[in-house]
Amino acid sequence: MCFMKKKKKILIGIAVALFTLLFVFPVAVFGFLNWRIFPPERLTPLVVKEVNKMVNGCLTCEKIELTFFETYPHLGIRFTNGQLVSHAIQDSLHIGHEALGADSLLRFSQATVSFRPLDYLFKGIVTIDEIVVKDPSFYGFVDDNGVANWDIFVSGKDSTAVGDSSAALPPIDLQKVRIVDGRFIYDDHQSGLHAEVGGFFFQLSGSLTTEGNTLDIETGSSSILFRSQAYTLNKKLALRLKSRIVLSDGFNTVTLQGAEMMVNNLPFTADGAITNLPERRSLGVNLEMGLKASDMNELLGFIPDAYLKDREKMVAAG
């Protein structure tokens, strides 16, 4: 009986120790950091200042705060109502307005980044466990000379160009990304291409580093506008893609493995690679695609009623 009581006390002690180590102690550390060391009113200008040292642009944000319960067991930072303005080039919309001198690259209502600070302290690697961005609006602009407004990260060599001698960015290991209800605009004046994507969502899991990567993604949109010198598409075209992708050649080659695509209600499959050819300013596409249907009757169901009369009387074999 005494042995059982002693064993019970030991188990209770172990449980209390684990609870204290895994929850109470991290909460106490988080509370000290969040309310004494880095409250939002102190953290916001500090983070904005440091980010602006690393980019050729300007970040503004209404509020930046530490998070713990939302990103447990990792520490996180939440950005509220942020905007990133590029100084890489001057958008044609700003010609004649010298005070602006840049164009808006990104806006969002909320962005949360969870990371592992111990990896940076002991390994020198920034391990980002997850990035969640809500309601983003991205505007990618390429001028007549082929200069893109998103090329804003400052390397170690030219960091003094923005008035600071900060070092280059450390290695980054990005593991998960989630984008909710985004809107993206791509405006290329050099090639005459313009594209807009609405209702965009994106989920990525894996490990995204500077080396080759294998990732699982799921992405899609509710509407697409595409305009070029030869063709214009402006329809409510819903897209959805779920695939494993492999990134190689310095992120210039994207290989799809077992991809499943939905174009409105049409299911497709795809395997192959898409390669960026910067020296030719073009894309190399090597894809095998197919329409996913179990039989001809299922395929008939994808044809709009406007093009198929007396549907209920039709039966296909094969």
Image: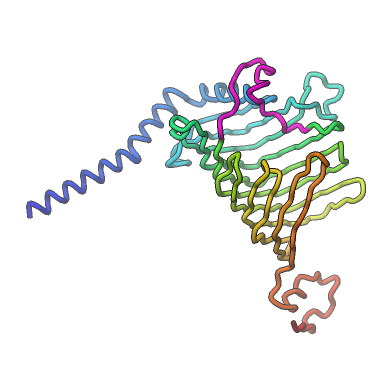
User: Is residue 11 placed above or below 149 in the rendered structure?
Assistant: below
- Residue nearest the observer in this picture, 199 or 121: 121
> Which residue does the image show at 55% across and 39% down from the upper left?
173
* Corner quadrant of residue 51: top right
Rendered image coloring scheme: rainbow
Q: Locate residue 5 relative to residue 239 in the image: left or right.
A: left
- Residue nearest the observer in this picture, 296 or 103: 296
Residue 101, position as x, y percentages in the image = 78, 22
Q: How many marks?
A: 0
User: Is residue 113 placed above or below 248 in the rendered structure?
Assistant: above
Tell me the quarter of the image containing the C terminus. Answer: bottom right
Q: Residue furthest left?
A: 2
User: Is residue 264 placed above or below 88 in the rendered structure?
Assistant: below
Asked if residue 131 is among those painted magenta in the image, a careful observer would answer: no
> Which residue does the image show at 90% across and 51% down from the upper left?
231
> Which residue does the image show at 30% across and 39% down from the upper left?
20
* Corner quadrant of residue 80: top right
Tell me the quarter of the image containing the N terminus. Answer: bottom left
Residue 280, position as x, y percentages in the image = 83, 41
Residue 61, position as x, y percentages in the image = 61, 28
Q: Locate residue 69 relative to residue 64 in the image: left or right.
A: left
Q: Residue furthest right?
A: 230
Please, what is the dominant secondary structure of the magenta stretch? Answer: loop
Q: Locate residue 9 relative to residue 224 in the image: left or right.
A: left
Magenta range = 148-171
Asked if residue 155 is among those painted magenta in the image, a careful observer would answer: yes
